[in-house]
Image (tube, rainbow, N blue to C red):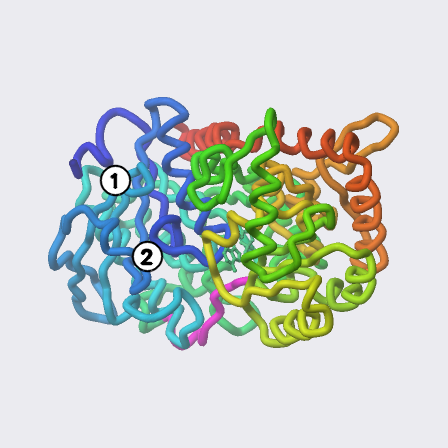
């Protein structure tokens, strides 16, 4: 099984990710890393993919098939650290899970003081593992700052380690704001001692795992075309726009896909009722179910505006806060699912307390409810300040829920504004980051909601949109081939 996992006469790709559905997820990266290996396998027989992932406390042990290494030796902190490695094919692609309890058997995924050490270890152990599973990979595909360590290490090992001499690296940016910064004094302890290695990491006096990924990798990708352009500007570059401009000939935007095996209103096991583009009747049942779940009046004619989101400044909640009164005055319901910064959690709670018959708030992470919201809501609101790709606008479309979004990053690439004269479009978008601009788009959407035929046209346009992984997976394969010359 191991030899088959990374063997044969095909392009061998190892994807490293700190989260992947169904093992762990905090946001879009989890969805993407869970879906891409499977999509790559389905593009045709010429890519052999494995996923390498940490074994977290929250990872469901029933997903593990067997332990494939006990005591895999990893060079670590000047000595040898031994770890167990588990195998799973739960995402319908071979996955290895690194079992290092002192780093990963903790509640949650990120947010620890030693995160840099935890993910540096994950990368070091992943590369040690890939030396044991049937020949070197052609490509190591890392995702976001936790995998920056692997890019730096592979870049320097290329010069002196024949095993990895031909391995090339692709580094995908899912969100440039998270940089994995840490004290530069730690670099030496983590085994990055050479002048070149320090250079990869150093940014404004601190070490940045993200910068190492951006500088040391052979190719860079990000999750939409528009975001690929935006991150080269000071406004969205988080201090690294100069580097992305410098490497722009190595940077490509590939819009994420949707795993329609998971996000399909005709089969979704979380829903009270199923529906599809031909018959939307089930969506009314889902709406009723959603209103009940939130304890809101069972008024099916009133539109539901919904949000599912990490509650961070990125997601535009200051616009919602500013517009809250006006949103409630429209007569629509507003339901929210999310957790994050307390100022937004508190504001949403206040919004609910002020209008308990109109507003429903669920604080926390709840996979089932996120599906139920997509199915039961009428309008999905994403007023993001920036959005590398965004997935919920695409899920919404498939569920006949019309997105109202700010025209940034992947939201701009995937949502087409409704054009009344031509009858085209699958949602509503606004450009300026302001509550007034957001409200204008919302008013327009609510106006159309009251014209059932118009609304149906917009819903169907979204439901028929094809945002499947196939196209994206083919583009990743192209990049793998370009970067390896194979
Ligand atoms: P980001 O990665 O910036 O959080 P994306 O739109 O790319 O944003 O992906 C977010 C993913 O996380 C979606 O699948 C969304 O449904 C999910 N999600 C976000 N918050 C929650 C929550 N509180 N409960 C369940 N799922 C959530």
**Relative image position of residue 312 (x, y in whole percent):** 61, 66
**Secondary structure found at label 2:** helix
- Which residue is farthest right? 421
Residue occupying the far front of the picture:
298
Q: Main secondary structure of the magenta part?
A: loop
Q: Position of residue 136 (x, y in %)?
A: 25, 40
Residue at figure coordinates x 39%, y 64% from the top left? 109
- SS of the residue under disc 1: loop
- The local crowd at label 2, few if under 14, some if 14 to 19, many if 20 or more residues have their Cα within 10 Å, is many
Q: Farthest residue toward the left?
A: 70
Question: What's the distance in space between the residues labelled 1 and 2, CA to CA?
Answer: 15 Å
Say whether mark 1 is within 8 Å of ligand 1. Answer: no
**Which residue carries the number 1 mark?**
136
Which contiguous range is marked in magenta? 178-187
Disc 2 marks which residue?
123
- 58 left or right of 262? left
Residue 362 numbered tag: none
Is 52 rendered above or below residue 177? Answer: above
Query: What is the count of numbered marks?
Result: 2
Mark 1 crowdedness (10 Å alpha carbons): few <14, some 14-19, many ≥20 = many
In this view of the protein, can residue 249 be seen by the observer? no
Q: Residue at x 82, y 55 (%)?
A: 439
- In the image, 460 versus 95, the foreground residue is 460
| Picture quarter with the C terminus | top left
Looking at the picture, does residue 202 appear above or below residue 166? Answer: below
In the displayed structure, would residue 93 be above or below residue 307? above
Residue occupying image coordinates x 50% and y 72%: 206
Q: Is residue 245 left or right of residue 485?
A: right
Any magenta on residue 421?
A: no
The spot of residue 32 in percent (x, y) is: 46, 44
Residue at screen point 13% across, 52% down: 69
């Amino acid at each position: 099984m191991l030899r088959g996992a990374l063997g044969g006469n095909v392009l061998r790709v190892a994807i490293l990710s700190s989260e992947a559905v169904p093992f762990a997820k905090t946001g879009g990266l989890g969805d993407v890393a869970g879906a891409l290996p499977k999509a790559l396998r389905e593009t045709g027989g010429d890519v052999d993919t494995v996923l390498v992932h940490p074994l977290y406390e929250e990872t469901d042990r029933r997903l593990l098939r067997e332990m494939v290494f006990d005591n895999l030796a990893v060079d670590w902190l000047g000595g040898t650290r031994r770890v167990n490695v588990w195998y799973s094919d739960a995402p319908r692609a071979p996955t290895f899970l690194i079992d290092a309890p002192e780093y990963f058997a903790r509640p949650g995924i990120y947010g620890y003081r030693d995160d840099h050490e935890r993910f540096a270890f994950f990368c070091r152990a992943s590369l040690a593992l890939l030396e044991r599973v049937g020949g070197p990979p052609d490509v190591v595909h890392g995702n976001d700052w936790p995998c920056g360590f692997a890019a730096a290490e592979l870049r320097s090992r290329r010069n002196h380690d024949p095993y990895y001499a031909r391995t090339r690296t692709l580094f995908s940016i899912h969100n440039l704001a998270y940089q994995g910064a840490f004290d530069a004094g730690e670099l030496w302890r983590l085994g990055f001692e050479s002048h070149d290695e320090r250079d990869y990491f150093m940014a404004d006096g601190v070490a940045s795992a993200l910068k190492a990924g951006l500088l040391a990798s052979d190719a860079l990708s990000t999750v939409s075309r528009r975001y690929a352009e935006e991150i080269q500007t000071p406004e969205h570059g988080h201090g690294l726009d100069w580097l992305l401009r410098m490497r722009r000939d190595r940077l490509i935007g590939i819009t994420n896909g949707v795993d329609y095996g998971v996000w399909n209103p005709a089969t979704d096991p979380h829903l009270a009722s199923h529906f599809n583009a031909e018959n939307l009747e089930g969506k009314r049942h889902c709406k009723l179910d959603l209103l009940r779940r939130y304890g809101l009046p069972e008024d099916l004619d009133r539109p539901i505006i919904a949000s599912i989101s990490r509650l961070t400044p990125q997601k535009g909640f200051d616009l919602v806060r500013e517009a809250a009164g006006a949103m409630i005055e429209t007569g629509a319901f507003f339901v929210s699912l999310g957790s994050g910064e307390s100022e937004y959690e508190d504001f949403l709670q206040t919004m609910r307390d002020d209008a308990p018959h109109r507003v429903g708030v669920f604080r926390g992470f709840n996979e089932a409810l996120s599906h139920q919201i997509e199915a039961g809501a009428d309008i999905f609101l994403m007023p993001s300040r920036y959005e590398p790709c965004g997935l919920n606008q695409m899920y919404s479309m498939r569920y006949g829920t019309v997105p109202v979004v700010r025209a940034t990053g992947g939201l701009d690439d995937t949502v087409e504004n409704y054009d009344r004269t031509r009858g085209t479009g699958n949602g509503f978008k606004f450009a300026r980051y302001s509550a007034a601009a957001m409200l204008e788009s919302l008013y327009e959407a609510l106006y159309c909601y009251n014209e059932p035929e118009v609304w149906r046209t917009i819903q169907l346009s979204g439901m028929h949109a094809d945002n499947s992984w196939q196209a994206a997976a083919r583009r990743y394969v192209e990049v793998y081939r370009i970067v390896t010359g194979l």
